Amino acid sequence: MKPYKPMAGLSGAEHSGIVRDVFSSIHDEYDFLNRFLSLRRDVYWRKRASESAGDIGQNRCLDLATGTADLALDLAAGNPRASVVAADLSVEMLDRARAKVNRLGLENRISLAACDAQNLPFPPSCFDAATIAFGIRNIPDRACALREIRRVLRAGGRIIVLEMGLPGNRALRKVYRTYLVRILPALARPFTRNTAAYRYLADSTVNFPEPAAFCGELVDAGFTGIKTVPLTFGAVNLYTGHKGESNSG
């Protein structure tokens, strides 16, 4: 594991390399640390994202940055006739996802794909919904990824983005920032050899756009009807929208 390099001033290639290195090194501890460090709120956050997808029916959903497929599994559970493509850049994460999918007997409904969200290997208009939980901040070129998501969604298809944020309340923001930057890496230290991963979590969260700015990015990418729901005092935000029909693609 290379020494952690802060995000400020990173090139796209450097950013991608750090993300791949970070998540490939913590796949064994990933699920446990998600539950532990969030006090199991991550389960609730993903459930809200899954519910926001609505009734997919017999259609297809794409879950990007799937990690170990927790959100993909929620989507499959909530839509028993739908199929889900769970995609991630990290092969190691997908190996963990595959074990969970197979253990639950869902390999016929959840397929796994190793791919980059900035260059999706899917034809246009082939999904009815697309989700990405705690992953959009890890993509160097968000605008490119959002355009790719729009391209693979059918007209009117739904986008759901779940992402870390900072509370709007000044006092809470200060406390939460301290937790992210100082306390969280210390809590993770006994359970992982790569505490740099949790320095990256803090860094990427602090540098992610405020909700209004990210909503603007969604609009610029061609999504309409954008809504933001702050969860747990704004520590996480749930963004939803639809593929607009004003742009080509």
Image (tube, rainbow, N blue to C red):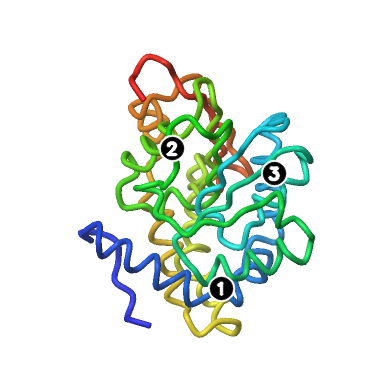
In which quadrant of the rendered image does the C terminus lie? top left
Horizontal placement of 190 versus 197: left or right?
A: right
Nearest to N terminus: mark 2 or mark 1: 1
Mark 1 crowd level (few <14, some 14–19, many ≥20, 10 Å Cα): many
Q: Secondary structure at mark 3?
A: helix
Residue at the image position 37 percent from the left and 33 percent from the top:
213
Q: CA distance from mark 2 to mark 1?
A: 30 Å
Mark 3 crowd level (few <14, some 14–19, many ≥20, 10 Å Cα): many
Nearest to N terminus: mark 1 or mark 3: 1
In which quadrant of the rendered image does the N terminus lie? bottom left
Mark 2 crowd level (few <14, some 14–19, many ≥20, 10 Å Cα): few
Corner quadrant of residue 67: bottom right
Q: Position of residue 113 (x, y in %)?
A: 52, 56
> What number is the disc on residue 27?
1
Q: Secondary structure at mark 2?
A: loop
Relative to 116, residue 80 above or below: above
Residue at the image position 35 percent from the left and 29 percent from the top:
221
Which residue is label 2 attached to? Answer: 123
Which residue is label 3 attached to? Answer: 75
Q: CA distance from mark 1 to mark 3?
A: 21 Å
Residue at the image position 40 percent from the left and 36 percent from the top:
214
